[in-house]
Image (spheres, grey):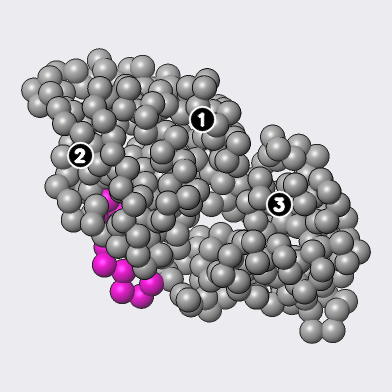
Amino acid sequence: MTAFRTPSRRLLLSGAAALALPALSRGALAQGAWPDRPIRVVVPFGAGTSTDIMTRLVTPRMSQELGQPMVVENRVGAGGIVGSEAVAKSPPDGYTLCMGSIASHSVNVSLMPRLPYDVLRDFTPVSLVTNAPNLLVVGPHVPATTLQEFLAWVRAQRGGASYASAGNGTSSHLAGELLKLKTGAPLEHVPYRSGAQVLTDIIPGQVAMTVYQVTAVLPFVRDGKLRALATTSARRLSWTPDVPTVEEQGVRPFDVAAWHGLFAPARLPAPVLERIFQALTVALNDAELRPKLAEQGLEPVGMAPAEFRPWLEGDIAKWREVVRAGNIKPD
């Protein structure tokens, strides 16, 4: 199948597939009685990050489905590498999982020259879990109401214009470099230490543009302090249905969102993989959980393991080209 486009449809398909899983794996699961003890879910980022918040929202519902506690452990360090490596080296028994992200399991493949794990060799991709979609916004000093007007304005500026990100290798940085690569616009990257600092400087005009998570910038857009020119995902967002996508405005292909995905160590037995995916599918379709994810700016996705691996391969390849073209280096 093609790369994910519509979360609700993907979830319905995944849910239908999950209903068939017990029949496929009942015999194999009965032999091992999996799970028979708590499951550890490593988040390779700090408490309060979007990966951490999402994991703590999703795992309780998965725990109900699996009949065992799911214990979330923050194992921080080196941009997601420390925790991810620990999971890669764990036994492939289903009791240690990793909630990875676009950083730890895609961008770092190209950004870090000596990554201590091979994402496609050392992990079993379970499912794409959520997207954290972004908006491309400009400050009120920029006289543009569409993406093409902004690009024309950038080209008219002596020396081009600047765009801010929350740091090298973040999705906001990658989106800016992808836009630069696709359009040839003279955009200069200005990395910040946090998104809050970005917003502090873009409003008074210290920088012209940024790409950032929709729920973080939406209050400023509604107050008129920022102007949303485009959605960087391949489809419009429920939060901002009137904001067209980058692709709709003539720059394609263009699909950027900070995603989160569930991984297990390589060589995870197929019946255990199916059981984990089934529990995740039930969680992501839960009517009480979905609004809580939306409050955090997260779109539930769900993607069967057989689809997630080729999707991941494509994502890694996409960012490898952007990292190379932009000569992006880690902080």
* Residue located at (26% from left, 17% from top): 22
Q: Where is residue 169 in the image (x, y as percent from the top left)?
A: 51, 67
Relative to 45, is 98 above or below? Answer: above
- Point out the stretch of residues depicted in magenta: 112-123
Q: Which mark is residue 175?
A: none
**Residue 190: percent from left, percent from top:** 65, 75
| Dot 1 alpha-carbon crowd within 10 angstroms: few under 14, some 14 to 19, many 20 or more | some
Give x and y (percent) for residue 289: 50, 27
Q: Which amino acid does label 1 sit on?
A: Arg
Please rate how many residues cluster around mark 3, counting C-alpha atoms within 10 Å: few if below 14, some from 14 to 19, many from 20: many
**In this picture, residue 229 sits left or right of residue 108:** right
Of residues 326 and 263, which is closer to you in this image?
A: 263
Which residue occupies 14% across, 47% down? 91
The residue drawn where x is 87% and y is 66% is 142
Of labels 1 and 3, the one closer to you: 3
The residue to which callout 1 is attached is 10
Which of the two labelled residues, at mark 3 and mark 2, occupies the earlier sequence position?
A: 2
The reply to whether callout 3 and callout 2 are in contact (CB within 8 Å) is no
The mark nearer the N terminus, 2 or 1, is: 1
User: x, y percentage for residue 143?
Assistant: 91, 64
Query: Residue 119 in magenta?
Result: yes
Most extreme residue toward the left is 31
Mark 1 element type:
helix
Taking the image as drawn, is residue 192 in sight?
yes
Amino acid type for the residue under numbered disc 3: Val
Q: Mark 2 points at which residue?
A: 95
Do the residues bearing badges 1 and 3 touch, measured as CB atoms within 8 Å? no
In the rendered structure, which amino acid carries the disc numbered 2?
A: Tyr
Q: What is the spatial separation of the Cα atoms under label 1 and label 3, in whole angstroms?
A: 27 Å
> Circle 3 is placed at which residue position?
217
